[in-house]
Image: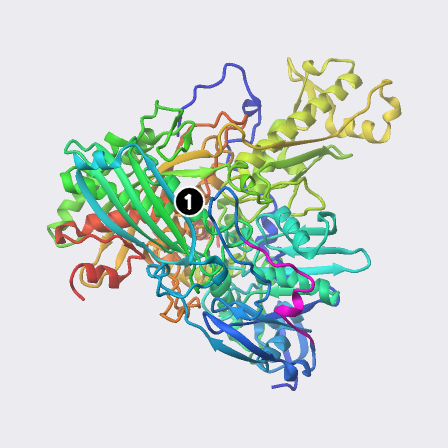
Amino acid sequence: MMVTRAPAETLSVLDRPNSYIGKTVPRPNLDRLLQGRGQYVSDLELPRMAHVVFLRSPYAHARIVAIDADAARRMSGVISIVTGRELEAVITPWVGVLSHLKGLKSAPQHAIAIDRACWQGEAVAAVVATSRAVAEDAMEQIAVDYEELEAVTDMRTALDPATPVIHASLGDNLAFERTLNAGDVDQALSGSEVVEADFVFGRHTGVTLEPRAVVADWNAAEARLTIYQGTQAPHMVQNIAALHLGLREAQVRVVCKDVGGSFGIKVHIYADEMATYALSKLLRRPIKFVADRVESFNTDIHARDHRCRGRIGVKPDGTITAFEIDDLTGIGPYSMYPRTSAIEANQVVNLVGGPYVTPNYRARARVVFQNKNVMCQYRAVGHPIACSVTEGLVDLAAAKIGMDPVEIRRRNLIADDAYPCASPSGMKFEQLSHHASLAKLLQMMDYDALRAEQTALRARNIHRGIGIASFIEVTNPSAAFYGVGGAKISSQDGVAVRLDAQGSVICQTSITEQGQGSESLTAQIVGSVLGVSMERVRVILGDTDNTPYGGGTWASRGAGIGGEAALQAAKALRQNVLDIAAAILQSTSGGLDIVNNSIVSADDGAPRIELSELARIVYFRPDTLPPGIQPELMATRHFVPRQYPFAFTNGVQASWLEVDTETGFVTLLKHWVVEDCGTIINPQLVDEQIRGGVVQGLGAALFEKCIYDERGQLTNANMADYLVPMSGEMPDIEIGHVVSPTRESELGAKGAGEAGTAGAAAAVANAVNDALRPFGATITEIPLTPQVILTALGRI
Amino acid sequence: MSTPVSVSLLVNGEPIDAFVLPRLNLADFLRENLKLTGTHIGCEHGVCGACTVRIDGEIVRSCLMLTVQAQGASVETIEGLSDSGEIADLQAAFRERNALQCGYCTPGMLMTAQDLLKHLPVPDRQAIREHLSGNYCRCTGYQAIVDAVEATARMRAERPA
């Protein structure tokens, strides 16, 4: 590990004795998950709870002529059958736009479709019954008369005059367009070698192992709705549910305990979840909705359906002179609410060319509507597209001028001493470490030895390839992400820390836990700053009634934003405790410290008073304290980055793989990542975040694709036909770090959750092309299925 | 289909008598009738492995088995294996190695790993990867799980018999 920032002259809270920061410690409370005693929403049962299933449109685009539910209504156990029109009485529709994405438009979306279904899988009626099985039985007895309408499926023709307009009121199928022009691209290209390629990205989805689940419980006597939901953003759900049900935020409580996978899938609010909240209010009882796997494939957001034409200019000496992209993406029939479906294309424009010096950059991104499932933000939003296009073009440029892929990167990556600086798209970089990262990567993988091995094996007709991908990663988003566009999604987070009556610590934080280790990092930071052992720190999260208001855990913000709030809250409480200790001990707070659960003398570390004894005095014998002392054993602090809209991180990945040119199969042999996420709180958790992210990127590279037919039918909506990485195909993944702490916070932590996914597919694609170079084949499409590879090789 | 039938079985050593619909699958029976929610449901079509339980010593997908098929059988779930201490060392290795993130696949993963170690006490990494390749994990990237299983195998091999 290499640290780029010189140590501060005075010791900070990060340097305290017995600090947990920077140490691998096991996550607290793992035993309940290991014993199968977690509390996922799908496990929850409440008294009088009913189950809802949704009757979903079998057509991608159809007018709902009539719904006959009489037979179903008469079935035993059926509580209610509710149509979109009936549900409209308790919940208002929404439009997924943000004002800072100029021109973004969408149509009003209802919790349950009214009159018309716009994708295969959109709910057209809700069946509520005493059990899910009964509800499913009843659903089969509902007769819907549909008039099938022409479906818009191919994004390449969505804007053609002959293509039907999905929402007539919008005028056309263009949801959003952004163009950017920096420097002088035409002039730069005119004096350069120019390489051009069409990059195609399969539409894929998150496949959280626990499907989306919600229990909504309207208490008519309290006029309060409690929503139990596996979500990444409880306060966002609270705000949106209140808004559309005509309630005040104080009337809605969102509780989120264990969440069975999220990856951005569970940061959105889906129409069927809105319908479940509304049904609870309408029927005045708890209602449970758990998506089955087919529903998950048809309704969990999809991502990455992009086609991007890219061009790069390069001089014979390897200087990259310009990047140009024209990106097209299809988002389904609605822009998702409240985060909108234009963010990914916008990120692609922001991120292409990001690691490189090149000042000339021209981009166009168009986002179009289709009659397919909605597309929206999924792990590493836009990053894999931008990274694959950029790094694919850089490799093509290197091949064109006969330069090694590492050498062309060395000549063009932004220098490690060039910061702060900005990209041609206006992104502000504080401190990145591309060259240090690349150097570390090459050393970890022993690049020269691998190249020699590759050459030797080629002579034996074994085709292995090396792929390199540098990347930048957006983390710690400020209000610039959503708030400026009018979305009620908090970018700040808060932590409240208090000392209990036995000298233990309770922290309430607004970030959430989906397995990343939010509880652990909060306890590590608070324990370190307070001088309290981690066993004595309990973390409460995922409950809008019992945590400060904040954003939650998404976009790699938990450690950087929630962690800094925890640090500042713990510092404030520490000062309060020392002030009280000084009064009790007739000392000064500066002369005291807290170490290992005790107040000690700062100079010699001699124990003075146990925290438990201090707490006893404060809570039970405050009469013995000197007059005028009002002990505050609780402190709350909030944090949001202000100076930089995002904390950019950087890293580089490499893939080593073998292509079987007879079968088209790819065998992953080894994968390396070097990532700079600033201060590392728990090395093991960071590494495992990166590994998990890499594997999601490898899935995109080789397996994952939502396959639609020309009528908009999703033809592989099950786990047997939609392939995800399994343990047998995955390589070991080696992780290294360069550390450039952000100066925006005292903690210095940036995010690490997107890094793996951002660059993995690009590394694999470059490695496959490297392996196939003797055949003159170039592939710029993922997933790299055997069919794609054999086609490129001219074998089929 | 709509008439409940009687079924008797052992679940984690405890005799259970119940009337169930013939169509009720074992995963739903464990979760809904017995409130043993450690057995998780990920796909309901036998692919993901989250619902893996042990029946008469062999691991099965409880979503693919009807409750009535378990008549007279001994069913063991993650709760039973945890309380008996049979997999305490494997669970400790998972905790130590952070071989779980969201934890949803974990009960099925532990069941499958324990099955491997019973049949092949010292598997190499590839054998571990292959045996676990019927169990989805979407969070960890699998490497930590393979490490934890490998470490457990090594510790058991070194333990005096």
Q: Residue A74 appears at what percent x and percent y?
A: 69, 83
Farthest-out residue, right: A623
Q: Residue A626 appears at what percent x and percent y?
A: 85, 18
Which quadrant of the rendered structure holds the N terminus of chain A? top left
Q: Kindly identify which residue carries mark 1.
A: A346
Is residue A754 found left or right of A134 in the rendered image?
A: left
Residue at point 23% right, 34% down?
A: A321
Q: Residue A33 appears at what percent x and percent y?
A: 58, 53
Residue at point 26% right, 31% down?
A: A412
- In front of the other: A75 or A504: A75
Q: Which chain letter matches label 1? A: A
Vertical placement of residue A581 versus A789, above or below: above
Residue at point 42% right, 30% down?
A: A428
Farthest-out residue, left: A459
Which quadrant of the rendered structure holds the C terminus of chain A? bottom left
Magenta extent: A79-95
Secondary structure at badge 1 equals helix
Q: Is residue A87 magenta?
A: yes
- In front of the other: A292 or A18: A292
Question: Which amino acid, by three-letter code, is at mark 1?
Answer: Asn
